[in-house]
Amino acid sequence: MRKLIYFISFLLTIVVGLGILFLYYAYAPIPHLKEPHYITVQPGDTVRSLAERLTSQGTEDRKKLFILAGRILGVGLHLKTGTYLIEPGMTPKQIYDLLSSGKSVARRLTIPEGFNIYQIDALLTKEGLIESNEFIALVTDPELIKQLNIPNTSLEGYLFPDTYFWGGSYKLKDFVNTMLTQFNTVWTSDWSKRANELGLTKHKVLTLASIIEKETGKAEERALVSSVFHNRLRRGMLLQADPTVVYGVKNYNGTITKKQLRTKTPYNTYMISGLPPGPICNPGKDAILAALYPANTNYLYFVAKNDSGFHVFTKTYAEHNVYVKLYQR
């Protein structure tokens, strides 16, 4: 009986000791956190993913304790998206309270799928985050493009459309790097393998995906539109995609003219064979998947059904003309 009492006392001593140690850690300033840092909580983040992100910000030797503290404090289900300022002298408890408070120092910024670099520049300018054309100047910088080994004159297509957070000491270059990083996170080795199977480079896949993104906003049509372009490319036919013409026109006013269709630019697929030299926008994940996995069809044409957003797909030019007359009067 005495041994049991000693054993229980020993266990209680350990438990109390661990509790005191935990309280000391949870409420003591992180010693190596010497400079302010910004950390962004994204949808789906967990205590572990945030701890991993903080390991380069002063918690390297205490990562497991940081994760344990978060779980014991029960903050995992209460994290709120946003960008937060982590300052020197903060304790793990204060950091978790901040990440659960929603008191973000950043602005939530959504870049829609299919936005091109000019539209992104206009959005950032409207939000008061940059001066007009500042974004354009950065993403067309030859040195940056060369450094990233992108075979184009801009970063068009590689700036992944998503929701981001901008705040604190965040700069335009940080924002561009974040978009590029997000693209590299989304693009997988399986996609590279599939591109090779199709005989396409990553750049050509993104170029095709950007055209698909602009041609249809209907999820169920993307693979069909993709099949048309794949079929045309295999047959050596012109793609004849209106959005590519628009991209090559300066000061486009919303209407494509016959003159523009007949004006040769690097992007006018009514005049050039194959794909244009690069993407015409920044496609989302679904458009990229459509480019990689087209539907198995014999379609060579499609025409919009008035303003419905849907299209009619056909195999022959004669069929196509019937629907053109029906819907494009």
Image: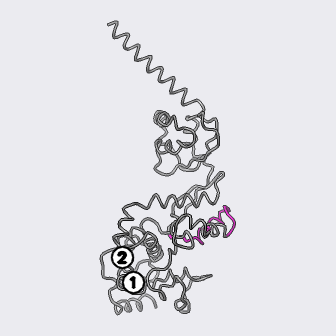
Query: Is 127 contained in the magenta span?
Result: yes
Residue 77, numbered circle: none
Where's residue 327, x and y in %? 42, 87
Where's residue 111, x and y in %? 55, 64
Number of labels in the image equals 2
* Residue stretch rendered in magenta on the structure: 114-132
Where's residue 317, x and y in %? 36, 91
x 44%, y 60%: residue: 186
Please name the amino acid that badge 2 sits on.
Leu
Residue that badge 1 annotates: 302
Q: Earlier in the sequence, mark 2 or mark 1?
A: 2
Query: Is 231 contained in the magenta span?
Result: no
Q: Are marks 2 and 1 in contact (CB under 8 Å)?
A: yes
Residue density around tag 1, few if under 14, some if 14–19, many if 20 or more, within 10 Å: many
Quarter of the image with the N terminus in it: top left
Residue that badge 2 annotates: 224
x 50%, y 58%: residue: 182
Where's residue 177, x and y in %? 57, 59
Is 210 placed left or right of 297 in the picture? right
